[in-house]
Image (cartoon, rainbow, N blue to C red):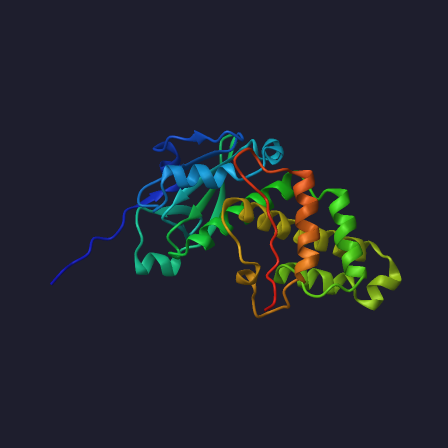
């Protein structure tokens, strides 16, 4: 009978104390620990896809790529390797304050899907940026004009739900503070999604249809392209990265 050893569980604080942090050319800090199944070169390419102009808002962050992140009661733990039992209890990511640093622990082994890992990192960066800076006014105006034009679909369930709330007839009629907050929530969700998709496209080739989910209709491709081009104008790609949009032609 073969008995497989269980992965070690370390506290997130201990992991942070036993890792060496690297700094990408764009200024972002990152590291990995244990059997994360991502090489330093892969991490460097991924982290390097974050546009340099975003970096000042992320100066207090450090991204930890670890096999599995688990919450044991109130304590954040990290598994040194993948296991079925660990994967069942693991979470995608968790933030933790470590002195002056806001650490972001990301599970790399929750799935073996490399695309999913890249998007998980990008959506975390996008959320971190919005939390620190908010939504550029010009982008908010763009998505609001699209919503008023009844463009089809949205980029996530959060954006879809937020847009439906802000477009309720009774909310539009009142112009209340509640409706203003709904619009703010919508703009934040839409910008977070678009920024994450933009960085994802810089880090790897993306087929937009791969982002489709069943719970809501996917945003029309021309509308997404307009959002991404606007973000690219605000946060141009770093040297060595290229932003391209290609439409699939119908045969």
Can you say whether 220 is above or below 181 in the image? below
> Which corner quadrant of the image does residue 89 belong to?
bottom left
The structure residue drawn at horizontal position 63% and vertical position 51%, both measured from the top left corner, is 194
**Quadrant (top left/top right/bottom left/bottom right) for the N terminus:** bottom left
Q: Position of residue 218 (x, y in %)?
A: 63, 64
Q: Is residue 104 left or right of residue 139?
A: left
Give the quarter of the figure containing the C terminus: bottom right
Residue 44 in the image, given as x and y percentages of width and height: 44, 36
Location of residue 35 in the rendering, given as x and y in whole percent from the top left corner: 31, 45
Q: Residue at x 77, y 58 (%)?
A: 146
Q: Is residue 245 left or right of residue 89?
A: right
Give 7 or 65, whichever is nearer the viewer. 65
Residue 103: % across, % down: 48, 38
Task: Looking at the picture, tell me which residue is in the foreground, 220 or 150.
Answer: 220
Compared with 122, 53 (above or below) is above
Residue 238 shown left or right of residue 117 in the figure: right
Residue sticking out furthest to the front: 251
Residue at the farthest left position: 1
* Foreground pick, 13 / 250: 250
């Amino acid at each position: 009978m073969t008995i497989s050893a269980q992965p070690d569980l370390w506290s997130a604080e201990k992991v942070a104390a036993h890792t060496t942090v690297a700094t990408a050319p764009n200024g972002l800090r990152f590291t990995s620990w244990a059997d994360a199944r991502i090489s330093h070169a892969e991490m460097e390419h991924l982290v390097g896809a974050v546009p340099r102009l975003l970096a000042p808002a992320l100066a207090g962050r450090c991204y930890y790529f670890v096999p599995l992140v688990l919450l044991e009661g109130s304590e954040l733990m990290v598994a040194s390797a993948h296991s079925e039992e660990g994967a069942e209890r693991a979470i995608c990511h968790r933030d933790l304050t470590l002195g002056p640093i806001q650490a972001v622990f990301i599970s790399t082994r929750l799935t073996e899907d490399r695309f999913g890992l890249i998007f998980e990192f990008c959506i975390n960066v996008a959320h971190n940026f919005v939390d620190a800076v908010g939504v550029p006014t010009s982008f908010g105006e763009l998505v609001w004009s699209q919503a008023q034009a009844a463009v089809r679909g949205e980029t996530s369930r959060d954006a879809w739900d937020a847009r439906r709330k802000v477009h309720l007839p009774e909310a539009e009629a009142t112009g209340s503070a509640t409706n203003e907050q709904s619009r703010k929530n919508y703009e934040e969700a839409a910008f977070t999604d678009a920024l994450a998709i933009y960085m994802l496209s810089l880090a790897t080739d993306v087929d937009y249809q791969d982002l489709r989910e069943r719970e809501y209709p996917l945003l029309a491709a021309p509308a997404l392209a307009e959002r991404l081009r606007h973000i690219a104008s605000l946060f141009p790609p770093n040297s060595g990265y290229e932003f391209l949009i290609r439409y699939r032609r119908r045969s």
